[in-house]
Amino acid sequence: MRATRRLSGFSALSVLAQLGFAFLAHCNNSPPSPEPQTPPSAHSQTDTQVSPPASANPMPIAANSGSNDSGSSGSSAPAVSAEAMTRLANDSNAFGFDLYQRVRAHGKGNMVLSPASITTALSMAWGGAKGETAEQMKKALHLEGSPQEVMQASGALIGALTDPNRPIKFRVANRLFGEKTYAFEAPYLDATKAAFGAPLESVDFINGFEPARAHINGWVEEQTENRIKDLIPPRGLDKETRLVLVNAIYFLGDWQAPFENEKTKPASFAVGGKSKKDVPTMHREDRLRYTEKDGVKALEIPYKGGNMSMVFVLPNQADGLDALEKSFDNSKLDELVRGLQGHTVRVSLPKFEINPAESLSLGDRLKDMGMTLAFTRAQADFTGIANPPKPEDRLYISKVFHKAFIRVDEKGTEAAAATGTVMMRSLAMPMPQQPVVFNADHPFLFFIRDNASGIVLFNGRVTDPSAK
């Protein structure tokens, strides 16, 4: 089975990331004979069965996420250190660069990913994995610590990112949609609800997987203000589906100092590093953080409040993006960020929107990263999520769907999930006294980061600002 990634967009200044998992049980096509039982857990919905807490090694309840989803828990939890959140951010970034390298090889055009969204959703699945399945997922995700520690750090980080006192709009919503006749483990449900604000909602996959798909897609639309539609495409589910895990991220941020509309005018851009075309280009001279190192220029433009920023990485050579991408990783991004210094910069930046229509297979990329058992019907071990007596009824990941969109203009950006730490020390070349020039007139990379933890919410490339 193939996993499909499609990117879709919406109105100006909007960026969304969506990730959904379809878990299939190896069951018969006919509905099970027993009538659904009343769930013993308050976290389940009307019909969904929940197995009582296991006596051996139950998953501990983690920290509350602060998610905007109505299912988030208000229970108290241990405090999570800033170091733990920064470590999780670094792990997410390392995974994001690893995944990016595998996705970038299958196309040369514009691209956007949300590593933070993907890490969050996969971490929820990893929390219910066991044995070698869990070890493979942990390694592929570059995670450190136990599921309890990761979930606590994830919840705390989401809470910080969604702080209503920030002058940006940031929403994270997670939900589990489970087959109403299937029994799930109560400790897992408690943990995911407490950490990620992800309650379990019962649906009827066996007798109505298409209505269930429409319901899940409708929930996604609601969480994203009707911006992401049809997250799960037709035939994305079937009557063997037992669980769909969905993550939705929404971010809206204005630049700390907007570009002036009247200064936007057509300017030449070397599409793909070669042929040139005129594209709407924004212009601004301001005090910004900038650095030059190893044949690239890096510029940071903050959003209101200074909590999050967008970092642009521009190779000196017009055709230098491919070489830059091949060698660029999390450590090099961190090195550039540490080298950023305040300077007067003359900025020329094209307006752009990335909203490709074609699909990518995210599942195959995850397998390439070593996460093979999770997708293997007879070998996956997600018994922490559900542990039916018949091995053929156990869960495995069948499909992964992801949608994202980004638009950058004079006012700002909308994007999804991340945290970042910015440290000031001089690793860059000395800045000249006169204003430096950052002219993004050829392909470049971009990163939306949280400045406290360093987590990358979005990363991608622009090879043609006029293309979607």
Image (spheres, rainbow, N blue to C red):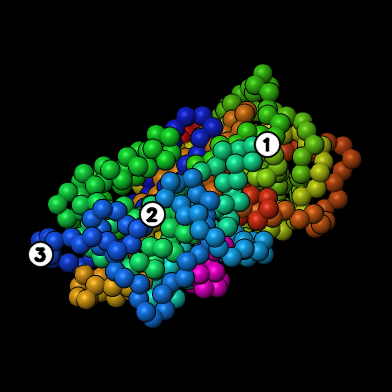
Q: Give the numbered dot on residue 199.
A: 2
**Percent position of residue 197, x then y:** 45, 53
Secondary element at tag 2: loop
Q: Is residue 141 magenta?
A: yes
Q: Give the numbered dot on residue 33.
A: 3
Q: Give the numbered dot on residue 304.
A: 1
Residue depicted at 77% across the width and 31% down the height: 285
> In terms of secondary structure, what is the magenta stretch mainly?
helix
Say what amino acid the circle numbered 3 marks.
Ser
Residue 25 in sight in this render: yes
Residue 324 in sight in this render: no
Up the image or down, 36 lies above or below 226; here it is below
Of discs 1 and 2, which sits in the foreground? 2
Q: Residue furthest bottom?
A: 56
Find the magenta span and give its range: 139-153
Residue 266 left/right relative to 208: right
Gap in Å between the C-alphas at discs 3 and 2? 26 Å
Q: Nearer the viewer, residue 400 or 419?
A: 419
The disc, 1 or 2, on the residue closer to the chain's N-terminal end is: 2
